[in-house]
Image (spheres, rainbow, N blue to C red):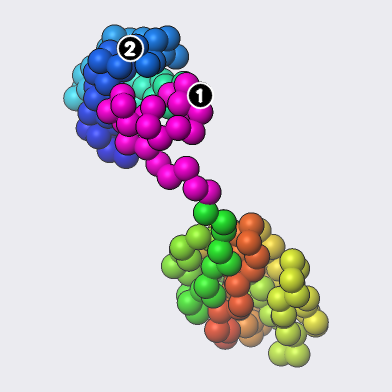
Amino acid sequence: MPVTQITALAHNISVKLTVASAIFASPAIPPEILDGAARRLELAYANRMNGAAAKTEFENAETALDEMLHAEAAYVNDVAKGDAAIIEMAGFTATSNIRKPAVIPVAPNAPAITGNAAALHLQIPAVPGADSYCWVIFTDDSTRAAVAETHVELSGAGIVIPDGISRETLRSVVTPGAKINVQVLAQNTAGKSGFSPAVSFTVGS
C-alpha cells in the first residue's frame, strides 16, 4: 500500500475509534497516538530524500505505523469476535464471516527460460491462488513427472524444486551444452495443479 494510503487509513481509523469509543473502549493503540504516528510518517516521507538519517527516519516511521495498524486490527477483531454488526456499527467494513476453502490452482503457463550454466533463470506468471510452485528440470529425455495426490513422482534424471516461487535461478547446477526440459506446477493447501507445457532449452556456457 502506498504511504499516502497508509497514512490516510491510519487517520480514518483513529477518527472511527474515537467516535466508537463506547464499543472499542480500550484500543491497543490510543487514537491520538495512531494519528500522531501517521503524521510522523507523512513528515518523514516528505523528507526521505534528505540524506541517510532522513531515509532511516522514514523507514522507522513506516515500520512503526504498520505495526500499530496490525495491533489495532487485532484489537478490533478481538472485541468483535467475528460479529460483522459490531464492526460495522463502528463504521468499519467487515470482511466475510465465511471461510472459503482453498481451490486447487490451474496449471501454469509454459515457463520462460534464459541464462546459462552459471545462472539459469526460470520464470512463469504468478498463478492466482498458488502458495508455491514445484519446478522439475529434466536432464534426461526419458524423464517423466506425474502428480500423485500429495506428491510428484519422477522417473529418470532430473532436478526438483519442490517449494519454489514463480521466479527461480539455478546457479552452476546444469552442465554447459546440456539440453533440458522444464515443467512447473502450482500448489496450495488444496493440492497440486497439473504440469505446465514442457519447454526445451540448450544450456549455454
In the image, residue 193 above or below residue 40 = below
In the image, residue 122 above or below residue 36 = below
Q: Earlier in the sequence, mark 1 or mark 2?
A: 2
Locate residue 198: give its quadrant.
bottom right
How packed mark 2 is, by other alpha carbons closer than 10 Å (few <14, some 14-19, many 20 or more), is: some
Q: Nearer the viewer, residue 138 or 23?
A: 23
- Horizontal and vertical percent position of residue 102: 57, 58
Start-end of magenta stretch: 76-99
Q: Nearer the viewer, residue 164 or 149?
A: 149
Q: Is residue 94 left or right of residue 188?
A: left
Q: Which mark is residue 21?
A: 2
Q: Nearer the viewer, residue 53 or 13?
A: 13
- Horizontal and vertical percent position of residue 15: 24, 18
SS assignment at label 2 = loop
- Horizontal and vertical percent position of residue 29: 40, 13
- Total number of numbered labels? 2
Q: Residue at x 48, y 69 (%)?
A: 124
